[in-house]
Amino acid sequence: MPLDVARAAFEWLVVGPHPLSLDGRLFPGFPARRVPLSEVRDRLLRRRCPQSLRDTVWSHLVLLTRTESAAWVVGAVGVALPALTSIAATLTARFAGAPSDIHAAVLAGFVAELGEIDLRRPRIMLRLRWAAYRAGHTALREALDAPVPSGHAFRSATPPPPWGHPDFVLARAVAEHAITAAEAELIGATRLEGVPLADAAIACGLSYEAAKKSRQRAERRLVAYLRGDAVSREDDLVTRVADAVLIDSATPWSRTPTKRGPVSPGGRDSGVQGCGSAPAAPAHTTSSPDLPQRSSGSNPGVPRCA
């Protein structure tokens, strides 16, 4: 598997008399010596590690991947491996095909985002993690949507299970204009993937109450859509437009339906986390959690990430 190859390469880089390391004097709380990246990863995964320190370390590490040798790209992948492994395992948990392509897509999405991510914004690893997740999810959707071979050549067919899971329910609701893609993103991340609403609100640039009310109104419309009922007066056109503008204009992780679905996972302020670009059709993956544990800290589900 591609992630196994990356793990083996990382282990070679952090052993011996001169392991790949960072100057601990640059980071508060680190020892005043060269700190191997394996130890850096362990320190960032600690629950008591402040988010500001994580951002400082990741900002420095990403700059090294852009200015130094390719060994630092492998080093960054190694530090993020707990999250990348969890993402790949979650995406392929119910996939009957060979998972190697999806694992490779997760890894490629993370590496590609190293060269693009804005280091001036907080929660760097969270946004790197999102990028890896979306790339893997796009590969999964393409695999599920591919025609199934038969004795009469290729033809379209019903995708294999779990074609009816919540991700596709949200996708159909968006396609039929019951909710917007951004609202589906918010519902899926907070209801299905275990992302705390407070974290989602921060990622969207909204207050907690604004995110809460927007989600409540979107969920009422979604329930009405699923039941075949008319939308209540409270959720009239003006309210829906206001919600869509509020979320779409604020959220940095809303997506167009050209890559992954409008729903994404996230985590708290501990663990290895990340973020990225847009998917192939608005859909949402299963919530088995980050993504194996999908979130960090006290948030069960997503793996703790740096």
Image (cartoon, rainbow, N blue to C red):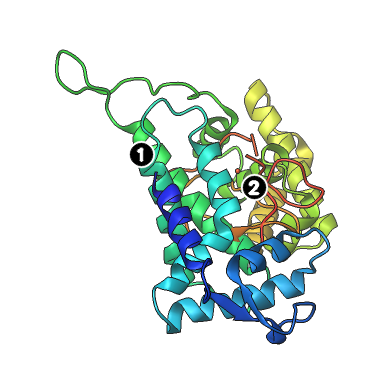
| Comes first in the chain, label 2 or label 1 | 1
Q: Is residue 35 left or right of residue 235?
A: left
* Residue nearest the viewer, comparing 251 with 79: 79
Residue 177 in picture, x, y percent from top left: 55, 40
Residue 195 in picture, x, y percent from top left: 72, 48
Residue 57 in picture, x, y percent from top left: 65, 75
Disc 2 designates what residue?
183
Name which quarter of the figure residue 35 lies in: bottom right
Task: Bin the neighbour count of mark 2 within 10 Å (Cα to Cα): few under 14, some 14-19, many 20 and up.
Answer: many
Disc 1 designates what residue?
142
At a point 58% along the width and 35% down the height, the residue shown is: 170
Q: Name above or below for residue 108 compared with residue 261.
A: below
Spatial CA distance of label 2 from label 1 is 23 Å
Q: Quadrant of the N terminus?
A: top left
Q: Secondary structure at mark 2?
A: helix
Name which quarter of the figure residue 173 lies in: top right
**Which residue occupies the extreme top position in the image?**
151
Name which quarter of the figure residue 184 lies in: top right
Q: Secondary structure at mark 1?
A: helix
At a point 83% along the width and 63% down the height, the residue shown is: 48
Task: Bin the neighbour count of mark 1 within 10 Å (Cα to Cα): few under 14, some 14-19, many 20 and up.
Answer: some
At a point 64% along the width and 49% down the height, the residue shown is: 290
**Which residue occupies the extreme front position in the image?**
17
Q: Quadrant of the C terminus?
A: bottom right
Q: Name above or below for residue 155 compared with residue 270.
A: above
* Residue type marked 1: Glu
Q: Name above or below for residue 26 compared with residue 10.
A: below
Q: Is any part of residue 201 visible from this angle? A: yes
* Residue nearest the viewer, comparing 11 with 108: 11
Of the residues tagged 2 and 1, which is closer to the observer? 1
Residue 229 in picture, x, y percent from top left: 68, 24
